[in-house]
Amino acid sequence: MQSETVQTGNSSWLRTIIIGRNPRFTAIRLVVVVALVLLLRAYVLIPIRVDGPSMLPSYREHTINVVNRLAYLNREPQRGDVVAIRFSGTSIMLMKRVVGLPGETVEFVDGKLVINGSPIDEAYVKNSCNWDFRPEHWRLSDDEYYVVGDNRSMPHEDHKKGSTRRERIVGKVML
């Protein structure tokens, strides 16, 4: 008789932990939490997967990061920000670093980034490169940003890089 009481006591304790004292309130809470997660996923936080070595060593291949779509609601992207760029359609995105801002002249001279004639120190670039681009082709308009990956040891032909309009920048990579 006593063992039945112990089992009933254990099962009610387990039920209270899983369902709560008021199952109706627990169900409502669960629905609210699921709705909030779905809204965050749809409108604020987007997962992005790194495909390719262009962001090495800062971001490894085949990792998943989160893009904050609200990061640029009240401010514009800054030099050094890692952003997600809508490449094609709504689901194909690139992850790149902003190196050139609107109105600037961007060039690479002997592998160094040069903005408006001044070399820029990029602490996130670990490998040297031999890229050589001249300014006559890379003057950015008022709504363009120049983006490039961190792995500059790759041949420049293998990189997806260049100017992109502000409207294509989806948000800032958080993780």
Image (spheres, grey):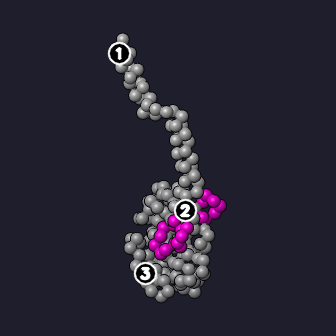
Label whose residue precedes the other's in the sequence (3 or 2): 2
Check disc 2 and give the amino acid type.
Answer: Arg
SS assignment at label 3? loop
Residue 12 falls in image quadrant:
top left
> Which residue is drawn at the image coordinates 50% and 86% (left, top)?
116
Looking at the rendering, the stretch of residues picked out in magenta corresponds to 71-92
Decide whether the magenta segment is chiefly helix, strand or loop: loop
User: Would you name the residue on which mark 1 appears?
Assistant: 3
CA distance for labels 3 and 1: 76 Å
Q: Nearer the viewer, mark 3 or mark 2?
A: 2
Q: Which residue is mark 2?
A: 69
Q: Is residue 8 left or right of residue 44?
A: left
Between marks 3 and 1 in the image, the one whose residue lies nearer the viewer: 1
Q: Which amino acid does the dot numbered 1 rest on? A: Ser
The answer to whether residue 63 is above or below residue 140 is: above
Q: How many residues crowd mark 3 within 10 Å: few (<14), some (14–19), many (20+)?
A: few
- Residue 4 in magenta? no
- Determine contact: label 1, label 2, CB under 8 Å: no
Mark 1 and mark 2 lie on one chain; the one further toward the N terminus is 1
In this view of the protein, which residue sits in the foreground, 12 or 64?
12
Furthest-left residue in this view: 2
Amino acid type at circle 3 is Ile
In this figure, which residue is indicated by the disc labeled 3? 120
Gap between marks 1 and 2 measured at Cα: 57 Å
Give residue 136's position: percent from left, percent from top.
57, 86
- Residue under the image location 63 percent in, 63 percent down: 88
